[in-house]
Amino acid sequence: MPVLNLRSDFTAAPDLTEQMQEIGHRARAAARKIAQASAQAKDVALRQVAECLRASREAILAENARDVAAAKASGQTQALIDRLTLDEGRLAAMADAVAKIGALPDPVGRQLAAFERPNGLLIERIAVPLGVVGVIFESRPNVTADAGALCLKAGNAAILRAGSDSHRTAMAIARAMREGLEAAGLPADAVQIVPTRDRAAVGAMLSGLDGCIDVIVPRGGRGLVERVQSEAKVPVFAHLDGICHVYVAAGADLDMARTLVINSKMRRTGICGAAETLLVDAAVAETHLAPLVTALIEAGCSVRGDEATQAVDARVTAATEIDWRTEYLDAIIAVKVVDGLDAAIAHIEANGSHHTDAIVTADAAEATRFLAEVDSAIVTHNASTQFADGGEFGFGAEIGIATGRMHARGPVGVEQLTTFKYRVHGRGQTRP
Amino acid sequence: MPVLNLRSDFTAAPDLTEQMQEIGHRARAAARKIAQASAQAKDVALRQVAECLRASREAILAENARDVAAAKASGQTQALIDRLTLDEGRLAAMADAVAKIGALPDPVGRQLAAFERPNGLLIERIAVPLGVVGVIFESRPNVTADAGALCLKAGNAAILRAGSDSHRTAMAIARAMREGLEAAGLPADAVQIVPTRDRAAVGAMLSGLDGCIDVIVPRGGRGLVERVQSEAKVPVFAHLDGICHVYVAAGADLDMARTLVINSKMRRTGICGAAETLLVDAAVAETHLAPLVTALIEAGCSVRGDEATQAVDARVTAATEIDWRTEYLDAIIAVKVVDGLDAAIAHIEANGSHHTDAIVTADAAEATRFLAEVDSAIVTHNASTQFADGGEFGFGAEIGIATGRMHARGPVGVEQLTTFKYRVHGRGQTRP
């Protein structure tokens, strides 16, 4: 689809502009209130939200059934329909996740630094909410509850825009969440769903709604993320690709390498932390390459390799330049023999996506250099790339994984949904 | 000047685009090297840079004399010529500042967090450099040395664009800095000056040079900052206005209030941390308002007030709505009587610029609410607004003050010129 068409799709008509602006102003006003809510008030509210989600089970599942029927009628893929479909179990899990987010430690009000100056001023750096978070997602309706709850926990208001497939379900979920907030005495407008399927609403959000949105989080496929990153006038927390590498270094134990390569690639192939490229140091290629390739193929993975890799197994097909930069999200891996640590780091710098990269080695010096020099959000030593996840990091939940350099990097949990301010405590000091 | 003209001014010709792209690639390559430099290597290099600035005294002053002569010939204001002019003393101070930045604690490699997971994974959040910082400044040539040194200390490369008035001086300063870097074995391209006066170079920088600039810092007047904020495709650390308030609350001691108001407004009127509006609680207006207004007028400040303020002194002129949103940067203050803390907070929210706001009070509860609810980068209690400064905060130096919510807020010192990555240390763990 040509870019110009997309852009004009996103240009809002005057009525919609006004409607979106109203949503923005309501969010900003709600954000000011929720920023001052105590840890306990937010915890209570999120438990209340979870309760309302459970109590609204029938309404939510009924709306979901309509979304699913419409998706089937319009010939959507089975994968999309799977992502879209809720059932009693998924809905209960969604409510439990909200309550669990409520029980996380409060990220607001943390003292990040404190220093006393020679003139007696005490200066504190204190975590405060970011403000208003815009979340744009596609077919997974549970993002409404997850992202909304994470934003609330960090004292932010959320403006959520569901994909048209999940629109009815998302509206029903948001309705339940707003009931929960009101019951707990917090402003319902801290969670708003854009009430229209009009794609121009996305363009309005990307413009920042005249200063009413502080950050945008896209949750969905590459197309969505790319569009948001190129058009947003406000900061974006996202990753475009997860081209994750496992580097089996000179000091790698073969058994550990095999276990980590298989887990990094094959545990789940469709997630952003799945490995897409295996690099093997030439120093251990003779002993390690063939067993690693065999293990991958036996695990059901197609292997595309450079010449050295093709030479060890006839089932390996030839990799092209494009393979080194491809996020397969499938049971396919690109394999290359590299000439030592520097070559591995250079390959990752040239082809990677600054998401998650792993080294396997028993040599501490090699590991230290890899962890220091590979410029990715997450670097692991002797650990699977599939640990790239807010839950696995102990953050309770994540709103996404960011590969940008500003503010948030790696799994974005409630802490990264805050910013800070300085409080200066004096006794009448003046500046000389 | 119409916006469209400015934009077309900034559109780069193909040759310039190529030249700027080359600068970007060199900066990125240098950033990768300097990111790995040890604390000691950077400290030694910055001392070497300081030495080269001292040794290049004659060349720098000669180029500066040419800039000053050109500025005089083109009829520039005396204020601009003052900002532009270097002498032996200013040059020595510039070199000393660079050496002092070298001696600051290394912000890179700090462990910001560390946690062990139940599966035995040790996860660290470690400070790493931001990457490439673009600095766009106007007539103060010392920004070249200050900003360059701060970027280097945080392991970043800097691309500096001087205003055309200070172009020759900035080039001479950068030449000396690059010599110092080379002498110390670090890449000279970690400090580059855009070698052309062509304003289209600014547009190229604001586009991010195809991913080669990570953040832009504008240093100059409101016009520059506004243009950078509206056109930049990359994050910006800046403040547009410093509309700082002093709120004299019900619990304020009159003597302390007088001292803090005079210092906040009159110590230096031209800095962004200078107070522009005085709010006085109606509860103490009868006792405090007249003495505060008298003190301001006697200190040489013009007072523009609401009706209550006009009533206490005939020399007070009438404030209009515009005054509450004006950054005078001069010996003028707007004064208003407000009905308690909530009204003060609401006034600041509606009219302020989220820079620095102060409360004067002996009442701890009043202070706590003000510090919590005023949503500014810096909030002070019983302390002058003029402390809004990286040096006063103990940061050694600052590259500017940011009022945005992302990444950096308040004085931006070397710590905020870093980002972070996660290092995951395992023993072969796989994700179940």
Image (cartoon, coloured by chain):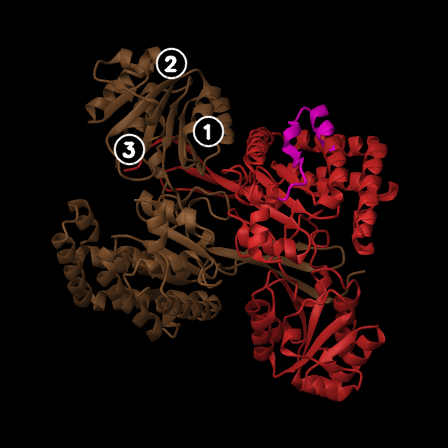
Chain colours: A red, B brown
Asked whether residue A181 is drawn in magenta, I would say: yes
Residue at image location 75% in from the left, 61% down from the top:
A270
Quickly name the residue at label 3: B328
Q: Secondary structure at mark 3?
A: loop
Q: Earlier in the sequence, mark 3 or mark 1?
A: 3
Q: Secondary structure at mark 2?
A: helix
Give me the chain letter of mark 2: B
Calculate the distance from the C-alpha at mark 1 to the C-alpha at mark 2. Answer: 22 Å
Q: Marks 1 and 3: in contact by CB < 8 Å?
A: no
Q: Earlier in the sequence, mark 2 or mark 3?
A: 2
Asked whether residue B236 is drawn in magenta, I would say: no
Residue at image location 73% in from the left, 85% down from the top:
A310
Residue at image location 39% in from the left, 72% down from the top:
B187
- Residue B284: numbered disc: 2
Left or right side of B333 for A293: right
Q: Position of residue A416 (x, y in %)?
A: 59, 47
Type of the residue with mark 1: Glu
Where residue A419 sits, quadrant-wise, is top right
Magenta part of the chain: A177-199
Give me the chain letter of mark 3: B
Left or right side of A381 for B14: left
- Figure quadrant of the C terminus of chain B: bottom right
